[in-house]
Amino acid sequence: MPTQSPVFIIDGSSFLYRAYYGMRPLQTSQGVSVQAVYSFCRMIRKIIKDFNVEHIVVVWDSKGKNVRHEIFPEYKATRQAPPVDLFEQKELILQFLTQIKMAQLSQVGIEADDLIGSLAKKFNDLGCQIMIVSGDKDLAQIVTNDAIKIFDAFKEKVVNEEQLVTQYGFPLSKLPFYFSLLGDASDNIPGVKGIGKKGATDLVIQFDSLDDLYANIDKVTKARTKELLLAQKDNAYLSLDLFTLRNYDVATTLDDTQFDEANWELTIPLLKTLEFKTLVADIEKKSVKVEQKNPSQQNLFEQAPQFLHDIYNFQLVTSLDSLLDVCAKIEAAGAFAIDTETTGLDPMVNECVGISIAIEPGTAYYIPFGHTTDEVQLPLQDLKEHLAPVFINRTIKKYLHHAKFDQVVLHQIGLPLAGVTFDTLIAASLLVQDWQKKGLKTLSEFYFDETMLTYEEMVKEFKVSNFAGISLQAATRYAAADAHQTLKLYHVFYAELEKQNLLSLFNTIEMPVNEILVAMQIEGIYCNTKILATLDTLVSQDLIKIEAEIAQYIDEPINLNSPKQIKELLFDKLNLPTQKKSAKKTGYSTDAQVLHTLSKIHPVPGLILKYRELFKLKSTYIESLPTYINSLTHKIHTSFNQALVATGRLSSSNPNLQNIPTGDLGYPMDIRSAFQAEPGHVLLAADYSQIELRILAHMSKDETLLDAFRLNKDIHTQTAAKIFDTHDSQISSTQRTVGKTINFSILYGLTSYGLSKSLEIPYKDAEKYIATYFAQYPGIVQWIDETIEFTKTHGFVTTLYGRKRYIPGIYEKNRTLFDLAKRMAINSPVQGTAAEIIKIGMINLEKNLVEHNLQAKILLQIHDELILSVPSDEVDKVSQVVKDSLESVVSWEIPLTVQIKTGLNWHDITK
C-alpha cells in the first residue's frame, strides 16, 4: 500500500564521506574523533524533522569487491585510502542507527547505488514517492518527476527530473550513454579519452544510444571524434556497462522502513557518551510535532517551523520602569548580549530604531524608540540617560554578533559601547569551515536546530520598506531573538574556543582589533570629488579616442564591452588566430592573456586591452567612489571585515579600498590622488617590507633565505643570481624581475606552466628556474613537504598564533582539487601569520599613540600596510612611534622592517 509521504532512501556512504570532510575535525574529551558522527546524526534528525519522515532506510556499500570489479578489475582503483578514523566513526554511526531502529540495507557484492535504484523501483511500483538523499551524480539516471527525486541534505536542495534535464541538456535515460563517452575519473571509468563534456553532449543529443552511435558512425562529422570513437569502442561499451545501474530483488519491505520518532530517546545514552549535548537537549526538549500546512505531496517542503518566540520569553520594553528593571538585571549579571535594529545596512547612515538585550538564556528584551508605527515607545533620551552608564562600563561584558556594525550604529546615536568582549561572528570565523555561512540565523539553525524569522519575512508580512514600519509586538519576536541566540552562541563558542586552544588568539588579537576597526570606520578618509571629475573627463576622452582608432579597422559600430562582438571582430573580421576556449567553453576566449598575445601581431587587441582598463577605472572607481561619500562627513567610511577571509586577512567593502589601482596611466593624477589628508594633516604610510618572505624564512629555517635577511640583502637579486649562476652585481633588472616573481610565486603554488606564462618564457626555461630555485633553498622544499604531510595527517594548517584553516581538499581524489588544496596548505600559514602580525602591530600602535598623547589616527589597512592621518606637527614623533610599534611585534633572528612615507595624498605615499 503506498505511503502518504515519500520513502526516504539515504545513500549511507555518500552521506558518511560528506559528513566527514564537510565539517572541521571534532573530538570528545577522551580524544575520540566524532565530526562525521555528529554531522551524520544531526542531518538525519533534521531530515526527519523537516519532512515529517515516516519511512526511511539507509543503504551502505558492502565490504570487498562487487560485480563491477569482476567486469573491470581497475574499477575505483585510483581512489586514495580513506583516513583510519573515518572507519572508526562509521562503526559509531552504525551503532547509532541500530539503537534508533532505523532500517539499513547492505548486500555482499552489490554496490549501494544498485541497491538504492532497486529499492526506489520496488517502492515506486507500489505507488510510493521516493526521495533519494545523496550527492552522487550516478543516481540521476533513475530520477522521474513527481515519483523519484534527489535531496542534497548538505545543500538543502531538492532536485527533480526537469532540473536535471535542463542541467544536462538531454533526457536522463541517456546518462549512461553520456558517461560511456565522458568516463568518470573518480571511479576510474575510462570513457573515450579525448572527448569532453561538450563533445559527449553533442553526440548524446544527435544519437539515441551508444548502439545507435556506432551503427551510424559515419554520421559523426568531426574526423578526430570519429577516430577516437573507433579506437576506443571497447572502452565505451565497458564504461556503459559500469555506469548503468542494475536492478536486484531486495528483501527490504515497506514495513521495514517505517520509523517511529519516539526511538530518538533510545539514542540518548550513546549521544551523551559522544558529548553531543545540543543534540541530546533537542531530543529531550518536549515539543509538539508541527503539523504540515497541507498534507498533500505537492506541499511536502512547505512545513510550518516552530519559531523562537513560541519557545522563549521575548518581552517588549516601552515603559521607564521596565527599562530600569532591565538595567538592574544587567548590572547584577555583569554581562549581556545586545543587537540593534536599523532601517538599512549602512551603519553610518541608516537610522537605529531599537535595541535588543539578552541577559540569560530563555528571556530577551526589545527596546524600540524609532518605529514609525503610532505606538508608545520610550524616547531615545531615556535610553541615553539610563542605558549609557551600562554601555560605557567596561567591567560589564557585552556579547554581539557582527559587533562592529552595532558599535558604529550605537556610536552614531550617542550610545557608544565599551567592554565588547565577544563577537560570535569572529568566533565563528575561527571555528566554522571556510565555506559554511556564518550568519546568526544559519548558526542558530546549525547549532540549536532553531529557526529564526528573517528580515525578508518581516518586511513582506507588513508590506513596509524597512524595519521602522513593523509593529512593536512583531518586531519584538524578530529582534529579541537576535540577542537571545547571540547569548546562546556565546556559551557554545567560548567553550569551543577554549577546547580548540583559540582563546588567546581571540582575546589578544581578534577582539582588540575589532575596536580599532570600529574607530577606523567612524573616522573615514577624505575623498576629493573634483579630482575624480577631472580624471573622469580625461578617461572619457581617451575611451572615445580608442573607439575611433578601432573603428578604422571595421566598417560598422561595435560595442567594445560585448564579449560576443569582440570575438567576432578578432576572429571573424580580422582573422586573428584563436588561442583558447572561454571558461564556459562557449567559444574562444578574449581574456587579457589572449589579448596580450594577439597584440604582438595586430594593434586592435592592444587597444581593446587599454579600453577595458580605462572602462573599469571609470565604472568601478571614478563613477562609483562618489556614491560612497557621506553627506555629513564628506568622507568615505569603508567597512573592514574580520570574518570573510579564511586566512584571517582583513577585507574591505562598501567600497573596497584595498583594491584601489596604483598603475601609472599617463594622467597628471590617479585615483589615489583623490584620497587626501585633511587640512593641517598629512597621510603616513607604514609598509612591512617583504613580510611574507620573512615569515617563510622563519618557518622554513632555510639558511640561505635567513642569511639574506640577516645581511639585509636584496632578496630578489640574490634569488636571480642563484638562478642565473652569477654574482649579485651582474644581475639585470629583467633578471631581478624573474627572481622577484619566483620568490612571491612560491607561496601561491609555483608551477612551470604558470611561471612560463607570467614571464613569457619557454616552458623548459621556467622548469629549469624552479628546479634551480629549490636546489638553492632546500629548507623551503623541506618545509613545503612537511606542511603538506601535516595537513594530510590533521586536516588543517595553523598560523604561528594558532589560527586553524581546515583543508578537506587535501583528501581529494580529483587531482586539480588536490593540487589546489596543497597550494592552500602552503600559503595559508604564511598569509595568516602576516595578517596576525599586522593586527598585533595595529594594537601596539593604537596603545602607544594613546600613551604618547598623539592625535594621529589609523585610517586604512591595505594588507601589509597601514595608512594614518597625522597632524603636521606630530609627523616626526608619530613616524618613530609607528616604526617602533610595528617592528617590535616579533623577536626573531631576522628583523621585521617597516618603511615610512608621508604626503598630502595617497598617491604621494604609494611605492
Image (cartoon, rainbow, N blue to C red):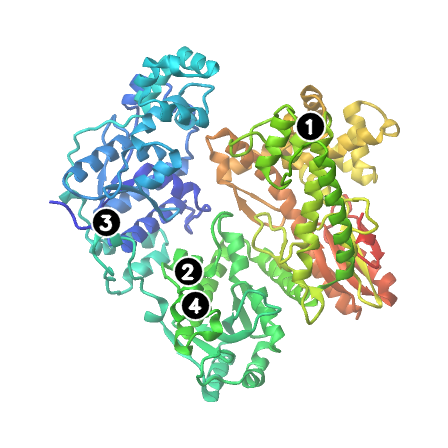
Q: SS for tag 4? A: helix
* Residue 643 image point, x, y percent: 56, 55
Label of residue 459 in the image = 4
Q: Are marks 4 and 1 in contact (CB under 8 Å)?
A: no
Q: Name the N-terminal-most of marks 4 and 3.
A: 3
| Residue 88 makes an appearance in the image | no
Write the residue at 24% across / 65% down.
288
Label of residue 444 in the image = 2
Q: Of 836 and 820, which appears nearest the observer?
A: 820
| Residue 639 makes an appearance in the image | yes
Provide the residue designation for mark 1.
598
Q: Nearer the viewer, mark 1 or mark 3?
A: 1
Vertical relation: 323 (above or below) 249: below
Q: Amino acid at mark 2?
A: Ser
Q: Amino acid at mark 4?
A: Val
Q: Nearer the viewer, mark 4 or mark 2?
A: 4
Q: SS for tag 3? A: loop
Q: Is residue 206 left or right of residue 249?
A: right
Provide the residue designation for mark 3.
100
Q: Name the N-terminal-most of marks 4 and 2.
A: 2
Distance of label 4 from label 1 (alpha carbons): 53 Å
* Residue 822 image point, x, y percent: 56, 35
Vertical relation: 125 (above or below) 466: above
Q: Name the N-terminal-most of marks 1 and 3.
A: 3
Distance of label 4 from label 3 (alpha carbons): 41 Å
Distance of label 4 from label 2 (alpha carbons): 21 Å
Q: Are marks 2 and 3 in contact (CB under 8 Å)?
A: no
Where residue 478 sits, quadrant-wise, is bottom left
Distance of label 1 from label 3 (alpha carbons): 66 Å
Q: SS for tag 1? A: helix
Q: Amino acid at mark 1?
A: Leu
